[in-house]
Image (tube, rainbow, N blue to C red):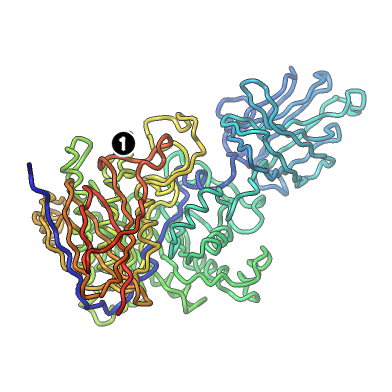
Amino acid sequence: MEQMSKARITLGKEQAGHTVSPYLFGHFIEDIDDHMTAMLAYPLRNMDFEEEDGDADGVSGCWKPLGFGKHTRFAVEPAARWHGGHSQRIRLFNMDRCEAGIGQEMHAAGDVVYRLRIIARATREISKLRVLLVNPRNGEQLGSTELDICSHRWQDLAGIIQASRACAGAELQVWAVPLPANEWEDSVSTGYVWFDHISLLPDQETGLLKREVFEMAKELNSGIMRLGGNYISLYHWEDFVGPTELRPNYVNEAWEEAGQVHKYFGTDEFISLCRQLGTEPQICVNMGTGTAEEAARWVEYCNGLADSEMGRLRVSHGHPEPYEVRYWEVGNEMYGPWQAGVCTPEQYAEMYLKFADAMKAVDASIMLLGCGTARESLAPGWNRKVLELAGTKMDFLTLHMYQGRNFFPIDAQTPGPERFKAMTAFSEIARSIFEDIEELIRGREELQHVKLAVTEWNTMFFPNPDLPNAHTLEAAVANACMLNEMLRQSHLVRIANFSDLVNGWVGGCIRVGDGYERMKQPGWSGQEEIVFGTATYHMLRMYANRKAHRLVEVEVACETFDAGASTLAAKSNSLPLQLDKLPKLDVVAALSESKDWLTLFVVNRSLEPVSLNCDLSEWRPAGEAILRELAGAHYETYNTVWEPEAIREEIRSLQLQGTSWVAELKPHSVCVLEVRISM
């Protein structure tokens, strides 16, 4: 029988001279894929009728025509005065003697009261609107309400509706009810109704988020929340403040067939959410198609006094006090060929200085984040040139770090154990990248103030449309190693935003529905509304809620492994990577601010159990400890709609053996030990 691997951890008394930034436990919101629709509480789509009439039935997008009138006409009408864009028009004929309307499929919750909002106008022949929630499969009526409509001018109508029971495939129907036939007076005997907006919002929403999503986001204890991503390079913030019905509708140009920009979550809504979550807002401004003046107006809208031009605009929208947004990122991935406004480092530095001067002229207290890159091969010399030309006016240089095929030669055919080693070794590459940039900073006296912000990070294994790798226990172990490295480098790395918060493109840590099976049509499981956390969600929550204030000295003696060659080594002579003797355990230790708790973050990045003896004698442990563990039978296990808690944090109290923690660490596991101490 093979002998179990042994390891020893020894904690010393030396403490780091810097504190751990709470902003290392940050998150990220962007308008990409289904991020917004999954995150926000609105159960309806295409609420403003901006989608095209793709099937030529006269009705916008996912809405469908309702009624039995032989002569009823449906059409999407162009924009007109006093409404935000296209409207849905229905023409009823007296000779049909019937109602007509539109409907959309939705998930109806049985325990929720929905706030109904309809912006509509009608000719005098239409007496009221009848709103129904029905089960279209059998005609069962689940809920109903009626709204009077009495004007040819746009009316903002409100009501409430509730389903008698939950129904996954329910349908919201809005019917135009005409006057009795003998009361129609116009010569052609027709009546019209126009809909500019139809929405439902559960009364249980918080910060416009689904209640379950908000509660899970709150538990993440996010220090900072970023608003950014590729879409921001085509985003003009002034279009997305003020009354939502007057905000324009336009296509999200950042990706092919990305749909509409979600106009219901703009600056004011983002700040409101941050306040309710208790997190610091961080905003990325549009350098791709925007201007320095536009960015400066955004700063003034958020931070200006009530008597400033943009401050007055904010006040008119119901927000008298400045938002005091401190962290502003200038441009998103401007080095990337996929980015609107992609440029050279010299061009970026020139533009950055203009943006920095304009934004600081409005509020000199803001912190500015300049665009850097972790992938030197995309833009050779980018970081060095940008820092040399514009670094004096930067507070942070940003990096986006997605471990996977970008740094290791792995693909869907790579054997699982080899892939696991590569993924969990990425933290070593991250360290080399951090050290390389730190050398650039330390080499110039005028750059000593610059810190790093990893404003996007996650696993990105390889193009894998049918494999939810980013949701597995393997991903959580790899992400824990990355977080450990950022903790070790926290003298330099002060901000980190996990990508994404909800669903999104590589594996948002909060999952809504069954979209993680990319080769299947969303809704395949009938569980479109289930909300659960990935393995990485549980790891992030486990880390962020601990009392890590100042790192302490730690020594690890354990077996090693060979992670294989990194593709990065061949692309950069400045990063001499040694990946053949990596310790199987990745360990960080931290002291609480009150100096009465010691926390160990221990990652077993091997596929075997490890017999551990951890010496805590230097810190006089009290004897009892709390252990939090994330583990599973296999590293490829992931949470699903059927087993949403297959991988989750397990918590238990334990008794130390004298001044030592003695344990058997499970394979591919993450442990967090909290020990009360007396100094």
- Viewer-proximal residue, 301 or 290? 301
Judge left or right: residue 71 versus residue 650.
right
Q: Is residue 344 visible?
A: no
**Residue shown at 47%/73% (left/top)?**
358
Q: Quadrant of the N terminus?
A: top left
- Viewer-proximal residue, 91 or 442? 442
Judge left or right: residue 409 versus residue 590.
left
Q: Is residue 535 above or below residue 220?
A: above
Q: Residue 20 location in percent, x, y? A: 33, 71
How many other residues sit within 10 Å of disc 1, few (<14), some (14-19) or many (≥20)?
A: some
- Viewer-proximal residue, 493 or 139? 139
Q: Is residue 232 visible?
A: yes
Q: Residue 368 location in percent, x, y? A: 41, 71
Judge left or right: residue 410 versus residue 593.
left
**Residue 391 location, quadrant:** bottom left
* Amino acid type of the residue that numbered disc 1 sits on in the rendered structure: Leu
**Residue 661 location, quadrant:** bottom left
Q: Quadrant of the C terminus?
A: bottom left
**Residue shown at 17%/37% (left/top)?**
415
Residue hosting label 1: 467
Q: Residue 305 location in percent, x, y? A: 61, 76
Q: Is residue 412 above or below residue 242?
A: above
Residue at the far bottom in the pictured view: 445
**Residue shown at 41%/65% (left/top)?**
330
Q: Residue 167 location in percent, x, y? A: 60, 31
Label count reads 1
* Disc 1, SS: loop
